[in-house]
Image (spheres, rainbow, N blue to C red):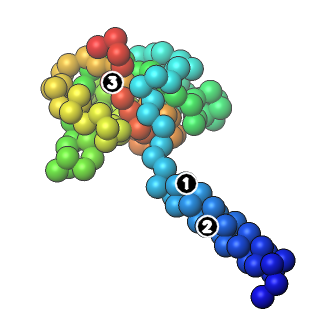
Amino acid sequence: MTSKKKFIVVGFIVIIAAAAAYGYKEYNRKPADLSNADAVAKLSAANLINEFDENEAGANKKYLGKVIEVTGPITEIENQHDTLINISLGANDDLHKVSCQIDPRHFSEAKHFDSGSVITLKGSCTGFLMDVELSRCVISKDQ
């Protein structure tokens, strides 16, 4: 094999290895921690629910895919064997709630709260189903 062919083969192998390493790194990348993210809005659970209830399309434009900070009383804490913690905010008699799926990196902090406690959570708004849905939630540093 000539030196030119060897150079091409080695270069090809290096490019394939670099692409494989990059692909592996991206495949295993975790979503960003929202602890230090700036919230585009800070509002109460009741106000957020009302906005989605009155004008879902307008609220989606305003909040969907954005980090928001919500304050309200805890109505329910759902802990599924430490694999998923979901905290619902709002009034007990309301039809809709704000459903906050806690980021797994912050499970230990979320376990210190009980139903009835007032809490401020920051998360990424993913829309309105029966509840306003927030994902990757973290407890606000102001708590």
Query: Circle 1: is it few (<14), some (14-19), or many (20+) Cα within 10 Å?
Result: few
Decide: is 133 above or below 29.
Answer: above
Query: Is the residue 139 above or below the residue 130 in the image?
Result: above
The residue carrying pointer 2 sits among few (fewer than 14), some (14 to 19) or many (20 or more) residues within 10 Å by Cα, namely few
Disc 3 secondary structure class: strand
The image quarter in which residue 19 lies: bottom right
Disc with the residue nearer the chain's start (1 vs 2): 2
Q: Residue at x 52, y 61 (%)?
A: 24
The amino acid marked with disc number 3 is Ile
Q: Nearer the viewer, mark 2 or mark 3?
A: 2
The residue furthest top is: 142
Quick one: SS at disc 2?
helix
Check disc 3 and report the residue beneath it: 139
- Residue 55 appearing in the image: no
Residue 17: assigned label: 2
| Residue type pointed to by label 2 | Ala
